Each structure stands twice: as structure tokens, then as C-alpha cells.
Amino acid sequence: MTAVETKTAETETAETTAADAEERPVREAAPLKHDEAASGRASKPRGKRRLGPGKAIPFGYVIGPLLLLGIWSWGSAQGWIDPRVLSAPWTVATTGWDLWESGRLGPDLVVSARRFALGLVFGVGAGLLLALVSGLSRWGEALVDGPVQLKRSIPNLALLPLLLLWFGIDERMKIITIALGVLIPIYIHTHNALRSIDGRYAELSETLRLSHRSFIGRVVLPGALPGFFLGMRFAVTASWLSLVVVEQVNATSGIGYMMLLAGTYGQTDIIIVGLVLYGLLGLTSDLIVRVIQRRALSWRRTLED
């Protein structure tokens, strides 16, 4: 091969390489533009539809109870519900007003509210303390968790004979019974929330050299608040349920005692008045806890927001 032919071949090879180099970005750019277009179409919102439960319904919390009240009223008005079995809503309302006017309902309501409040306070305090001891220490868990789980397996109704022997029939027995019913849900949910905190937060706190007190105050307690409030919702319900039981066992006052006397004389309307009061008080207590929870946990973004 002569020098001229060699030079010509080298020139053609260089031109081919340059052409391939110019065409390669074009070929590579085409899929990129296609991907970008596809990504743009995917990210483009197709509508305002949300995957969550939707916007909050004003006063949605009372729609269910009002629906039940409407069904009850309709059934009573049509004569489908025997008044000897279930009194009509207007009869219950009239009976409740008469009891209030006669001065019988007010004192019983105050006594029941006092027992509920004292049992709730003592139960929440004891459950929270035990949950912190058990949730923040392995030794605490070994000493506390077993007895609490044993108590969890024993219903309060089974403990009543023993509590009557220990404390008699005075207010101490009633408040302790309510507190025992409150303690369990507070302990279970708070302990679970404490143990469910991400371990990386503890590692970060060690890196930042936080003290044990600062770690509990800034990391542990805020992280356990959702579980604590969930336990509170169960606790207020358990408190009213326990109150129903203790006020019908050797009691001389309270809503439960009023219902017990009404059952003795076959006064269905007074029994329904007591049940309605228990239901309304429980519903109001749960609503108060939910409002406090929403304000205390306003930093969270959940489907409820």
C-alpha cells in the first residue's frame, strides 16, 4: 500500500469515527427525551382526587348517634318497638327531665362523675409510671411487665369479691376498681409506643451527647404520645364500664344505683335514662381526648388531617 492510499484510508477512518461520535449523542438523547416526556406525563396531575379518606365532615362525629336516634324514634312511632321493652325517646327525655326537676338525678350524676374522675386520674398515673419503668429499662420490664400481663388476663368483675373483702363497700373499693380498669390500656399502649421508637433516634442522641433526661424529654416522650393518647381513648371507656359495675354492687348512690332500683320496680324508662347518660358521657369523654390529641400532635401529618 502506497503512502497516498494509507493517508486516504486514515482520513476515511477519522471521518467515520467523527460521524459516529456526532450521531451517538443524538441516539442516546432520543430515549432520554422520551423518558422525560413520559415522566412529565406521569407527574402531571390528572385531577384533584385524593387517595385518603377525604375532607373532614362538619359534625361528622354525631351523625352515627343521630342516625340511631332516628331509627329508634321511627320504630317507636310506628309501634314496632314495645314500650315495655324499650321506651320511646320522648318518654326517656320526659323521664330524665322529671328526675332532674325532682332533684334525684343531679346528686347521682355528680357522684358518678367524681368516681369516674378519681379512678381515671389514679389509673392513668399508675399506668403511665409503670409503662415508663418497663419501657425504658430491661430490668423494669422484667419486674413489671409480667404482673401487669397477669392482671390483664383477670377481669375486674372477678376481682370484686376480693376487693370487697379488702376495702369493704366504701368509695375506696369503687375507685380502685375503676383505676385497675384504666391502668391496663394506658400501660399496654404506652409501653408499645416506647418500644416502637426508631432505634436510630437513640443513636443520633448518643452522637449529639444528649443526657438521659434530655433523651427522655426530647425524644422518648414525644415519640410515645400517639400510643399514650390511643390508650387514653380506651381508658376513658374502661373507666365508664368499670363505673357501671361498681355502682351496681352494694352502692347507695350514682347512676348505676338509680338503674338498679329502677330494674327492681320494672321502670324501663329510668333504666334507659341511665344508659343514655352513660353513652353520652362516654362519647363526650372520647371527643375531649381526641381534641386534645389533635392539638398535642399537630406536628404530625396523617390521613386524619
Image: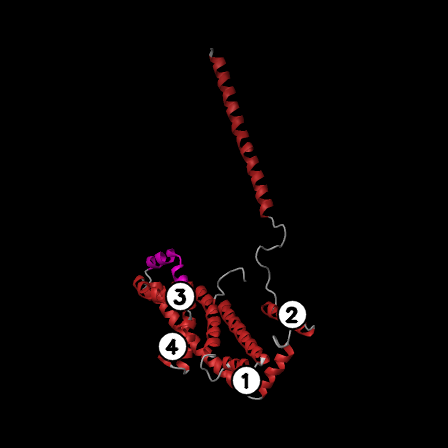
Looking at the rendered structure, the secondary structure element under dot 2 is helix
Q: Pick whichever, 256 or 17, lies toward us.
A: 256
Asked if marks 4 and 3 touch (Cβ < 8 Å), the reply is no
Cα distance between the residues tagged 1 and 4: 28 Å
| Residue shown at the point (51%, 69%) measured from the top left | 290
Magenta span: helix, strand or loop, mainly? Answer: helix
Marked residue nearer the N-terminal end (2 or 1): 2
| Residue shown at the point (29%, 63%) measured from the top left | 139
Asked if marks 1 and 4 touch (Cβ < 8 Å), the reply is no
Looking at the rendered structure, the secondary structure element under dot 3 is helix
Residue receiving disc 4: 163
Marked residue nearer the N-terminal end (2 or 4): 2
| Residue shown at the point (38%, 72%) measured from the top left | 126
Q: Position of residue 13 (x, y in %)?
A: 50, 21
Residue neighbourhood size for the residue with mark 1, other residues' Cα within 10 Å, grouped as few (<14), some (14–19), many (≥20): some
Say left or right for 218 vs 64: left
Residue receiving disc 1: 105
* Magenta stretch in the rendered image: 188-208
Marked residue nearer the N-terminal end (1 or 4): 1
Residue receiving disc 3: 153
Asked if marks 2 and 3 touch (Cβ < 8 Å), the reply is no
In the image, farthest residue toward the bottom: 102
